[in-house]
Image: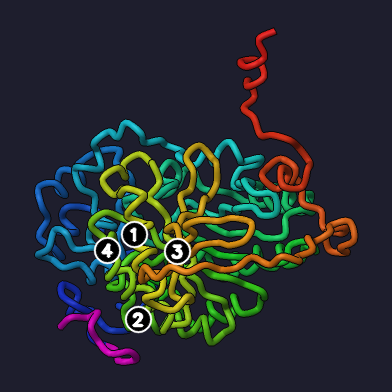
Amino acid sequence: MDYSSQQKGIQAPPPSPWKELAMDQWSDWRWQLANRLNSIEDLDRVIRLTESEKEALSKEGLFRVDITPYFASLIDPEDPNCPIRLQVIPRSEEMVADTFSMVDSLAEDEHSPVPGIIHRYPDRVLMLLTTQCASYCRFCTRSRIVGNPSANFGSSDFERQIEYIQNHPEVRDVLLSGGDPLVLPRKFLGSILSRLQGIAHVEIVRINTRMPVFLPQRITDDFVETLQEFKPLWLNVHFNHPKEITPEVEKALEKMADAGIVLGSQSVLLAGVNDCANIMIEMMHKLVRNRVRPYYIYQCDQVTGAGHFRTPVSKGIEIIESLRGHTSGYSIPTFVVDMPAGGGKVPLQPNYLLSTSEEKVVLRNYEGYISAYVQPTDYQSHDPETCEYCKKTKRPGKEQGVWGLMHGQKRAIKPDDWDDKHHRR
């Protein structure tokens, strides 16, 4: 019986090779974690491994492999290009050196003032709570630390993280990540959320997780009750393919949405997995039906071991072009490139602005229809000197970027050595 194809709300018996297992045991998230598959012997019981996969699984020092039995049950055992399989089972391509790959492709360590805090943007921080996950994606951006128990964080690290946030009143948004924060004990995660809620300038907390995908059994009623205590709480689930959205996953999403937790989705554009507009459209529609708002599609980072997953950036723009106008705006995420070496996220989209002048702008739509929008002739520009919101709003670092150029804070943005190179006197 195909376990993943059961109708929502109907419990099916565990799939082969776990058919002798009791249903309550299969549904126990602790059993799922304790029985993850990580060796050739384990996986041989579930799928027909290729020589490429066997070679990678035999390689010492490879990024950690662990797959929950539930997620393994979604793999097509005969298809080496199954999109579920490609995400979690290594292949020999993972061992091929990529000239442009980096261990820390986003320069997170350079933006880490204390262990576990990444402060890249002025008003928000990334707070790493763990290096552990339920299963491990082969394209993980943090594979330098994720999956490594010796790189985990301790109580002293958490104290320094909280203290850093307390001492930086510009931080209004805290994003909990890792690893996966939802692998942590319920009470411990609740204590972290409680402490963050007690910091006056922290307005929202977000959680990045893949737990509902890898292990929907973890989303128990008591776990949801713990999360429900903290508002506003935003939870971004990482979905990469519509086959991941099973009845079990839908039930987990329903519990969280009913509890008032705001759900979003982030996806990574992956060669051979989801580099197809029709796959993306089906996934976005399934997400919206389950009250999950598509948020980002990420260009795959230039991280070591993930070179075979990368697509041209143009593929992401092509997919957005295929979504815009062909489905509702709520179903369209933002395509972003997280700039190498720590530049942050840059949104990209097709060009719909064809020409502009003081009188008109010429626009095209998704069908190729072109028309002109007439500019107003009597517009009075907004005056920040008389605006109460402009006067009271303080944004540290705003004078450094494009905002500073637009508002006269500076005349140019230049590399550090620009003056030395161009002033010949």
3 in magenta: yes
Q: Residues within 10 Å of mark 4 (few under 14, many from 20)?
A: some
**CB contact under 8 Å: marks 1 and 2:** no
Instruction: Tell which circle, 4 or 3, labels the residue nearer the N-terminal end.
Output: 3
Q: Distance between the residues labelled 3 and 2?
A: 19 Å
- Residue carrying label 2: 248
Q: Main secondary structure of the magenta part?
A: loop
**CB contact under 8 Å: marks 3 and 2:** no
Q: Distance between the residues labelled 4 and 3?
A: 16 Å
Establish if 289 lies above or below 204.
Answer: below
Amino acid type at circle 4 is Cys
Amino acid type at circle 2 is Glu
Q: Can residue 384 be seen in this view?
A: yes
- Residue carrying label 3: 266
Q: Which of labels 4 and 3 is toward the front? A: 4
Secondary structure category for the residue under label 1: helix
Q: Can residue 397 be seen in this view?
A: no
Secondary structure category for the residue under label 4: loop
Percent position of residue 3, x then y: 22, 81
Establish if 255 lies above or below 44.
Answer: below
Q: Which of labels 3 and 2 is toward the front? A: 3
Amino acid type at circle 3 is Gln
Compare residues 184 and 288 and report the one nearer the observer. Answer: 288
Percent position of residue 359, x then y: 62, 61
Q: Which mark is residue 276?
A: 4
Establish if 234 lies above or below 163.
Answer: below
Q: How far apart are marks 1 and 2 (CA)?
A: 32 Å
Q: Which residues are the magenta region?
A: 1-11
- Residue carrying label 1: 318
